[in-house]
Amino acid sequence: MRFSDYHPGINFCFFAAALAGTILFRHPVYLALSFCAAALWSMELKEAKALWFDALALLLAALFALWYASYHHFGVTPLWTNRVGNEVTLESLLYGLMLGGTIAAVLVWLNCLHTVFTADKTIYLAGRIAPKLALFLAILLRLVPRIKTQWRRTAAARRGIGCGTGGLPERCRNWVRLFSGMVTWTLDSIVVLSDAMRSRGAALKGRTAYSLYRFDHRDRTLVIAIFTLITLCMMAFLLGQTLMRFDPMLHFSPITTVSVIFYAAWTALCLLPLGVDLLGGYLFRRAQIRH
């Protein structure tokens, strides 16, 4: 059983905790652990495509750190002097790397979220809180692939009657007419879908919604593990173990036995979905061998 097969509420709680910790924890160790765990899980989910995305995110973080250190001057440890005569300090460089690494880690986590959180999960969670929002999302998510299909059909039909085959001005006019027709078609489709959903009782109070998800014993076990690790990470945050000062000089809490426990808790939380996926794959392969 993979992590994406668990209850959508569990998926939401994990991603909320991982993203919140990545953004709030201003310590290089926590940030590096978060990025590495997200990168490993994304490569397990998307393989080679995720590797290129993770490498690009890391490169952009390094470039952002160089840009930040060149235009923000603080710290007491000079490294070199740039072209305009300003000193680049170690503190500003590390702070820029921390900001860029935070953005990179958040992007990698969002890449994983996009894979795990399907449209039905989003509608399921939103439907319990805001039914009208869930209805809007259902219509929107269903409409996006239809718009792409209709765009290709309309463009092919116009090419068949000889529209848009001339020079650049003629192609621009054809594109404007095509875009105008697609806007009209989209608005008309939204009205038709809204009327159809309303006639089926989508706006009635107390209506029930069909769901494939059920909270079972495996979900309860994973919830206990997630919230135990979240509690330890919150203790680290409240005790100041997740913070680091960069101005005027580097200052962070010394590494002790307690801080190692907090590092381990954050690592376990970030690697939890990857561990669930690997364990589920191992048990599935072992069951196949037995049979």
Image: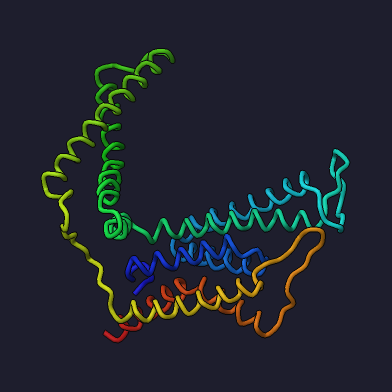
Picture layout, residue 253 above or below residue 24? below
In front of the other: 242 or 94: 242
- Residue in the picture at 44% in, 80% down: 225
The quadrant where residue 159 appears: top left
Residue at (65, 63) in percent of width and height: 26
Q: Is residue 24 above or below residue 63?
A: below
Q: Residue 183: where, in percent of width, then height?
A: 30, 28
Side of 256 where 8 appears, left or right: left
On the image, the x and y values in percent for residue 215 come to 28, 74
Residue 285: x and y, percent? 35, 79
Image color mode: rainbow
Above or below, 137 relative to 156: below
User: Looking at the figure, which quarter contains the N terminus?
Assistant: bottom left
Q: Is residue 268 left or right of residue 139?
A: right
Q: Quadrant of residue 187?
A: top left
Quarter of the rendering occupied by the C terminus: bottom left
Camera-nearest residue between 99 and 47: 99
The x and y percentages for residue 11 are 39, 66
- The structure residue drawn at horizontal position 31% and vertical position 23%, both measured from the top left corner, is 180
Across the whole image, how many numbered discs are drawn on residues? 0
* Left or right, residue 15 beside residue 75: left
For this rendering, which residue is in front, 275 or 20? 20
Q: Residue at x 51, y 65 (%)?
A: 18
Furthest residue toward left = 199
